[in-house]
Amino acid sequence: MIKVMTILMLTPFFCHAEETGKPFISKPFMKFGRGMVNIISSPLELPNQMYILSDHAKENSNYGIETASAAIEGVFMGMVYAFWRLGAGTYDLFTFPIPEYESCLITPIYFTISYKEYYEKEEKGEPEGKPDIETSTF
């Protein structure tokens, strides 16, 4: 049993990860911390999503009913994000010795109250050059 625990504790030191400028020794602990934060903050997603969606509807609408319906939608989206954040945190917590330190299963990585972080993804433009398929009517 002691041998297994020693191997698990030393695994991060023998694995190789991509260089991102942070010390190699801190990467598994950052993943462990990210997992703990996501597990602890997962129940906060329910009121957070209600607030985010109703606030966004309030800014973009003149009708109060849209704000109320966005708050109701926020209940369901909050449950989805809460379970998703709980699952991502659990995954990070149990796999922190494995060398994939930079990836996370949820975006945004940490709990935030920004509509843009949750719902507005960067749109990628079409690649320049000739498309693979011709779109001709003839």
Image (cartoon, rainbow, N blue to C red):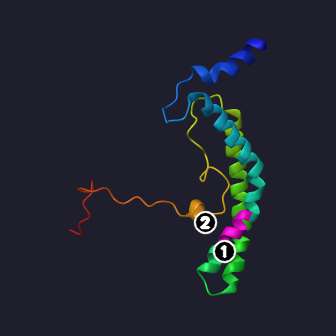
> Residues in magenta?
48-54
| Residue type at tag 1 | Asp
Question: Who's the residue at 64% across and 32% down the image?
Answer: 28
Question: Who's the residue at 24% across and 56% down the image?
Answer: 129
How far apart are labels 1 and 2 at the CA level?
9 Å
55 sits left or right of 20 in the view? right
How far across and how far down the image is residue 7, in percent?
68, 16
**Neighbour tally class for label 2: few under 14, some 14-19, many 20 plus, Cα within 10 Å:** some
Question: Who's the residue at 73% across and 55% down the image?
Answer: 82
Mark 1 touching mark 2, by CB under 8 A? yes
How far across and how far down the image is residue 6, in percent?
72, 16
Count of picture labels: 2
- Is the residue 88 above or below the residue 133 in the image? above
23 sits left or right of 73 in the view? left
Name the residue that disc number 2 marks. Answer: 115
Name the residue that disc number 1 marks. Answer: 55
